[in-house]
Image (tube, rainbow, N blue to C red):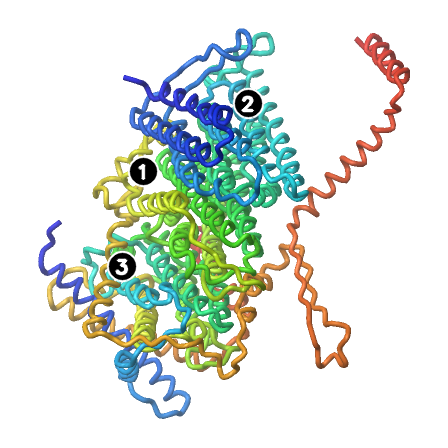
């Protein structure tokens, strides 16, 4: 009987097969794409199986690889938490790999796809390894491989200067994060064994160690900032809206859907598993940052009219929602309220898998739209529902899910988070009792704004009429792209309708990390009912709501169609104006205008209406020009000053450089003298 | 899952009452409004006549209407009926009630609104897009306020399940709790916004400066329009009954003999009629607000409901 961890290692090796294919059959593009992405899909599916088995078994498995530095071998461990993240990563990688078969062969650029295939597989394998790593060394190696592989994927279309700039920004942010994580591990390992031996680098040793609170706080802050830079928590989010839009859409789906989740995994691993005991302000900090990310992310998204940029900002929002759950769980844990901690943690984790599914689906849909229209600006699209019926239906599922509307999956995790918020009266600190309901209000605002944003997205892209200047005949996505999106949509529906089954399966994670199970209360009524904490307190039955709505709609439809009714199709009523053009429709900019009026102070907005100069009188404008530019305020607040300082500093340091060898020799001589004098 | 027959009967009775009584409630409000403004009213039955008229008319669809446009009326009506089966209106012995708590109820309404806004954008006229944009803007401001009001009620009732909220309030002593009062006032403001009444939206105009809800559904006709109108009436009525369940639950039957059900229907009619009077007084007393002054109106609702939460933690 093969164990889950062996299965997982085996599948990681399987990711090397497509890379071999690149060498062997690199010349036949179609065959290469077909075979290599099928193998990636299969390998991902094996990982899903390994993850499901690991969570169901409920016990950790260890493996030591004879690789790495001398006397510092790589440690691997597959426990419930790793298993869960294997499932999240594997499931989306499976869908996206199927989707990629069609997507990559349709990439318009004549570029060779070998580089894409190689780095795509390294990227996925590295994400699996991050989840399996059980020592600081291997974790950082896998982490950096993941970052480097995704850098090359973002750079895939490197002929545009915009893409090179985005990739560079991503690389810088990823490295700042990696350095902080490295320092955090250094602190933990140093505290564990002192600085005499190296054995403290395994997570097992760190778990055993008795970490003094101050050092624990330092390690937590360092690692949280490091992971936040990867996850795109505000104010570390600036790279997301730059890097995600320029990558190929299958890569954006993976980066946004699952790569950000590895950072969530890191945060949970460090706090709940390694440090374990922490004061309440840690959780409060995570909660507040989560709330800020959620509401600011969705507001920035609402202002965008570039589809993929908009989706990238929504990742910031959803990472915020996940952190809200984790932060609440940390607060409850530090006050020794295990049941509530379990509920909040499961809410956060459930949103993790939900976000992976619907964000992956939305990016896949965006890829299909881009593919068909060669257009990223939503204001040049419209009416695609007629040409792309399948894609639009799948995209609609993604829109409903991300807007947290029942009966789809986004709603379930938000509902669980609300339930966790409602348990705040049990907290002993009065200030927290007041703060936390306000957090729930912010979450409600986020949900409603997300719904508004996705009405805009779906309405502008798929409904109405084509807005572009030149008419473009869009065609429906190919079968493999449709299958990928269909599977993801189906998963969204299942996670939304049958949450009780999934939560029962996941419950072992809360048992390990929050010391209690939710199952004693969540499954009383059976698989149809979601009753966290207590059926008296709250209950939700996804299947009944879905069946109810479908049944009433069907009955109404049948009753109204007893006798065949007449439907006459006529041109749009134009109020007698007769000159309606498709440019007169509401577009993304006009749709978000009320929101710009209300929340405008949060943005750096420049809005101008210029009337053309050749007019006779200002009262009779011939032509007017509308200009709108919206910028992230964080650029001006944080990034611009920091970049300016760094440039200034390096200029100053540059004074030391002369390019003449004898000057440098003098520098080294002086350094040696100074060191000798000091030591 | 076998249920005793009388429970199924109560459930069916409630759904029938919701579907049938909703137009009458709107008729009552319109009639009072006419009287208060010195006009002759068309009577309480006028909404029924409107719906009946629309049902016999043929449907006229724009050339580019998609399936979204065609399923939306059914979804609007269907979601309203489903919510009508879970709010305890005539009895707390509703076997479907546990399938959705108060947060789910609000979210199901949000789903209907989502589709209605999409349908507004489907034809591609400026009116539809404008209505959709404004409706979603108003919704995003009402959502936090309504959630805080719900939060107060569920803190006091120790549950988000409507059945338990009703039971814990109607069994408790009749005392004036400041938190519930604040939440109640906030809820009234929110219902006005959600139901699209003056001063947030004016259901009786077709002028581009004033309409929100009407702009979204401007392209509908025939049975589609009838379903949307009927669904909106049910939705308005359900918000009123939701308010009754959360803030004035006394009189809702907890046993299931015919006598107490009849009494609870009677109380429901009285309470709904009184709430109708309050709505009309607000509508006639206030003028329609400018769109961007709504932030103040809904901000006030949010502030009141937040006060409710604070009052709960400080005083109780």
Relative image position of residue A190 (x, y in whole percent): 58, 15
Chain at tag 3: A
Could you say which disc has been placed on residue A503 in the image? 1
**Same chain shared by disc 3 and disc 2:** yes
* First in sequence: mark 3 vs mark 1: 1
* Secondary element at image label 2: helix
Chain at tag 2: A
**Same chain shared by disc 3 and disc 1:** yes
- Looking at the image, is mark 3 or mark 1 nearer the viewer? 3
Crowding near the residue tagged with mark 3, few <14, some 14–19, many ≥20 C-alpha atoms within 10 Å: many
Relative image position of residue B188 (x, y in whole percent): 40, 68
Relative to residue A454, is residue A194 depicted above or below?
Answer: above
Can you say which quadrant of the picture contains the C terminus of chain A? top right
Can you say which quadrant of the picture contains the N terminus of chain A? top left
Q: Residue under label 3, please give it.
A: A549
Quadrant of residue A247 within the rendered picture: top right
Relative image position of residue B289 (x, y in whole percent): 52, 75
A69 or A212: nearer the eye?
A69
> Quick check: can you spot residue A422?
no
Residue visible at 50% across and 40% down?
Answer: A256
Distance in Å between CA atoms under marks 2 and 1:
31 Å
Q: Residue under label 2, please give it.
A: A140
Q: How many marks?
A: 3
Q: Are marks 3 and 1 in contact (CB under 8 Å)?
A: no
Residue visible at 26% across and 65% down?
Answer: B81
- Looking at the image, is mark 2 or mark 1 nearer the viewer? 2
B1 or B282: nearer the eye?
B1
* First in sequence: mark 3 vs mark 2: 2
> Quick check: can you spot residue A250?
yes
Quadrant of residue A36 within the rendered picture: top left
Residue visible at 67% across and 40% down?
Answer: A165
* Secondary element at image label 3: helix
């Amino acid at each position: 009987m093969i164990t889950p961890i062996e299965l997982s290692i085996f599948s990681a090796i399987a990711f090397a097969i497509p890379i071999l294919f690149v060498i062997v059959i690199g010349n036949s593009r179609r065959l290469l794409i077909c075979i290599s992405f099928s193998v990636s899909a299969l390998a991902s599916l094996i990982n899903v199986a390994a993850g499901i088995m690991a969570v169901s078994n409920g016990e950790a498995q260890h493996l030591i690889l004879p690789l790495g530095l001398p006397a510092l071998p790589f440690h691997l461990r597959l426990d419930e938490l790793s298993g869960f993240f294997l499932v999240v990563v594997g499931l989306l990688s499976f869908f996206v790999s199927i989707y990629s078969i069609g997507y990559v062969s349709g990439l318009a650029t004549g570029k060779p796809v070998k580089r894409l295939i190689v780095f795509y597989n390294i990227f996925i394998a590295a994400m699996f390894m991050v989840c399996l790593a059980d020592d600081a060394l291997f974790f950082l190696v896998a982490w950096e491989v993941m970052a480097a592989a995704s850098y090359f994927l973002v750079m895939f279309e490197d002929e545009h200067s915009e893409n090179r700039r985005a990739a560079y920004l991503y690389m810088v942010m990823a490295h700042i994060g990696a350095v902080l994580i490295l320092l955090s591990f250094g602190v933990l390992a140093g505290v564990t064994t002192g600085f005499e031996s190296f054995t403290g680098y395994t997570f097992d040793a760190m778990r055993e160690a008795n970490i003094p609170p101050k050092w624990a706080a330092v390690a937590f802050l360092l690692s949280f900032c490091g992971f936040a830079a990867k996850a795109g928590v505000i104010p570390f989010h600036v790279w997301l809206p730059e890097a995600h839009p320029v990558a190929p859409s299958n890569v954006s789906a993976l980066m946004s859907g699952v790569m950000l989740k590895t950072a969530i995994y890191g945060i949970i691993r460090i706090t709940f598993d390694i440090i374990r005991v922490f004061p309440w302000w840690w959780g409060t900090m995570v909660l507040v940052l989560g709330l800020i990310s959620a509401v600011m992310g969705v507001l920035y998204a609402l202002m965008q009219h570039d589809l993929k940029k908009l989706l990238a900002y929504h990742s910031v929002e959803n990472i915020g929602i996940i952190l809200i759950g984790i932060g609440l769980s940390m607060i409850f844990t530090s006050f020794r309220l295990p049941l509530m901690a379990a509920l909040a943690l499961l809410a956060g984790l459930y949103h993790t898998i939900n976000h992976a599914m619907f964000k992956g689906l939305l990016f896949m849909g965006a890829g299909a739209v881009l593919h068909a229209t060669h257009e990223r600006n939503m204001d040049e699209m419209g009416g695609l529902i007629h040409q792309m019926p399948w894609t639009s239906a799948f995209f609609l599922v993604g829109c409903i899910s991300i807007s947290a509307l029942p009966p789809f999956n986004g709603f379930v995790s938000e509902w669980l988070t609300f339930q966790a918020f409602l348990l705040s009266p049990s907290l002993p600190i009065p200030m927290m009792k007041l703060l936390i309901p306000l957090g729930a209000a912010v979450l409600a605002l986020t949900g409603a704004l997300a719904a508004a944003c996705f009405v805009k997205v779906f309405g502008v892209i798929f409904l109405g009429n084509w807005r572009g200047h030149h008419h473009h005949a869009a065609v429906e996505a190919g079968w493999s792209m449709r299958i990928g999106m269909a599977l993801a949509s189906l998963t969204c529906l299942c996670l939304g309708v049958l949450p009780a089954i999934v939560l029962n399966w996941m419950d072992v994670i809360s048992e390990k990390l929050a010391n209690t199970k939710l199952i004693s209360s969540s499954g009383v009524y059976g698989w149809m009912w979601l009753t966290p904490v207590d059926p008296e307190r709250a209950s939700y039955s996804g299947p009944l709501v879905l069946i109810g709505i479908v049944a009433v709609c069907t009955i109404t439809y049948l009753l109204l169609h007893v006798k065949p009714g007449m439907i006459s199709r006529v041109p749009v009523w134009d109020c007698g104006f007769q000159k309606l053009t498709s440019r007169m429709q509401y577009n993304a900019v006009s749709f978000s205008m009320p929101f710009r009026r209300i929340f405008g102070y949060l943005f750096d907005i420049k809005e101008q209406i210029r009337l053309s100069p050749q007019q006779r009188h200002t009262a009779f404008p011939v032509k007017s020009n509308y200009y709108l530019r919206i910028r992230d305020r964080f650029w001006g607040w944080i990034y611009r000053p920091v970049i300016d300082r760094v440039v200034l500093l390096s200029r100053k340091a540059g004074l030391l450089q002369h390019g003449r060898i004898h000057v440098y020799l003098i520098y080294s001589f002086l350094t040696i003298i100074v060191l000798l004098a000091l030591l | 899952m076998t249920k005793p027959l009388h429970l199924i009967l109560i459930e069916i009775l409630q759904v029938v009452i919701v579907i049938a009584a909703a137009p009458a409630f709107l008729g009552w409000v319109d009639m009072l409004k006419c009287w208060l403004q010195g006009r002759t009213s068309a009577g309480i039955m006028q909404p029924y006549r409107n719906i009946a008229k629309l049902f016999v008319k043929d449907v006229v669809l724009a050339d580019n209407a998609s399936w979204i446009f065609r399923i939306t009326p059914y979804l609007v009506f269907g979601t309203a009926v489903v919510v009508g089966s879970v709010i305890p209106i005539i009895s707390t012995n509703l076997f479907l009630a546990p399938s959705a708590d108060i947060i789910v109820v609000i979210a199901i309404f949000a789903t209907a609104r989502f589709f209605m806004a999409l349908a507004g954008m489907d034809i591609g006229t400026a009116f539809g897009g404008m209505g959709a944009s404004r409706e979603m803007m108003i919704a995003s401001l009402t959502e936090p306020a309504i959630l805080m009001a719900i939060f107060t009620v569920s803190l006091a009732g120790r549950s988000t399940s409507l059945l338990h909220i009703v039971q814990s309030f109607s069994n408790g002593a009749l005392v004036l709790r400041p938190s519930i009062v604040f939440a109640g006032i906030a809820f009234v403001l929110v219902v006005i916004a959600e139901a699209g009444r003056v001063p947030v939206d004016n259901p009786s105009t077709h002028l581009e400066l004033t309409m929100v809800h009407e702009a979204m559904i401007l392209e509908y006709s025939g049975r589609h329009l009838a379903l949307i109108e009927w669904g909106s009436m049910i939705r308005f009525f359900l918000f009123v009954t939701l308010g009754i369940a959360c803030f004035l639950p006394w009189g809702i039957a907890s046993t299931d003999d015919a006598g107490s059900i009849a009494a609870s229907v009677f109380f429901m009619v009285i309470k709904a009629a009184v709430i109708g009077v309050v709505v009309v007084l607000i509508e006639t007393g206030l003028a329609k607000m400018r769109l961007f002054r709504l932030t103040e109106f809904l901000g006030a609702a949010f502030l009141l409901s937040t006060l409710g939460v604070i009052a709960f933690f400080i005083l109780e």
